[in-house]
Image: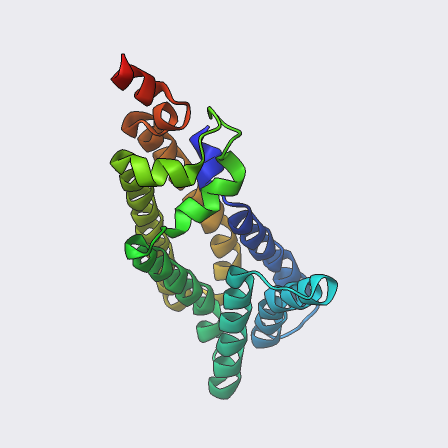
């Protein structure tokens, strides 16, 4: 259903990378490693994953490069300032930048969520085989649906980012990595539910299946 459109594969990979950090962090802390060093170890994981991808394929997804670059900048800034709180807030700043990227893309030729949903749904889920390029040019409702859903994702990511930054500076340091790891799955689930209802109500599946066009012809 619409859940698949919101559950962009790249978002799932980012979520998996985030969820791998708390066990590493708490394992290092249990071994007596300092908060700062344990956080640095977790911060390097996304960059390492990106480096492995590049070595294997000699190519790099735009989002993966964006994440890795932001992570490395955050680590560099934390090393200069020596602040564990800054490292904890780094995920919030990264999510906030991604949220702004979603919002900015609303006015682009194609919004960001359109590109995320297309590989998963075009010609597969409730589709009569019509190209999404054709639907985009022919159906104003189709364009509006993807712009609105992209705006919803952008706003949700900004709220997620704000919560992460507040947690980083307001809560005990050792509590934040675990709560941060739980926050993204909750945000993603809510986004999927909201988008699922919106796509049904707005008529996305009637458009992709050709039902709307047949009704108009009739």
Q: Residue at x 45, y 73 (%)?
A: 85
Across and down, in percent, residue 144 comes to: 27, 40
Q: Total label count? A: 0
Q: Report the coloring of the rendering.
A: rainbow
Across and down, in percent, residue 190 comes to: 39, 39
Q: Nearer the viewer, residue 139 or 201?
A: 139
Q: Nearer the viewer, residue 17 or 214?
A: 214
Q: Quadrant of the C terminus?
A: top left
Q: Residue at x 42, y 65 (%)?
A: 168
Across and down, in percent, residue 57 comes to: 70, 61
Q: Residue at x 70, y 65 (%)?
A: 52
Q: Is residue 137 visible?
A: yes
Across and down, in percent, residue 125 comes to: 50, 27
Q: Residue at x 28, y 55 (%)?
A: 107
Q: Left or right: where does residue 197 sit relative to residue 35?
A: left
Write down the quadrant of residue 167 in the picture: bottom left
Q: Is residue 167 visible?
A: no
Q: Nearer the viewer, residue 87 or 14?
A: 14
Write down the quadrant of residue 169 in the picture: bottom left
Q: Residue furthest top?
A: 218
């Amino acid at each position: 259903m619409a859940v698949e459109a919101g559950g962009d594969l790249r978002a799932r990979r980012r979520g998996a990378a985030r969820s791998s950090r708390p066990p590493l962090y708490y394992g290092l802390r249990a071994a007596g490693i300092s908060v700062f060093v344990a956080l640095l170890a977790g911060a390097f994981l996304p960059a390492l994953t990106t480096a492995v991808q590049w070595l294997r394929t000699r190519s790099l997804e735009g989002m993966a490069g964006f994440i890795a670059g932001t992570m490395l900048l955050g680590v560099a800034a934390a090393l200069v300032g020596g602040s564990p709180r800054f490292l904890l807030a780094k995920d919030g700043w990264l999510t906030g930048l991604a949220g702004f990227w979603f919002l900015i893309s609303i006015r682009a030729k194609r919004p960001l969520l359109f590109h995320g949903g297309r590989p998963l749904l075009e010609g597969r889920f409730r589709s009569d085989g019509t190209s999404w390029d054709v639907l985009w040019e022919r159906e104003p409702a189709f364009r509006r649906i993807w712009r609105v859903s992209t705006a919803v994702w952008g706003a949700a990511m900004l709220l997620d980012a704000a919560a992460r930054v507040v947690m980083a500076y307001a809560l005990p340091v050792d509590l934040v990595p675990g709560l941060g790891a739980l926050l993204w799955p909750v945000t993603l689930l809510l986004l999927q539910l909201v988008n699922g209802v919106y796509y049904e109500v707005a008529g996305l599946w009637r458009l992709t299946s050709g039902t709307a066009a047949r009704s108009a012809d009739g």
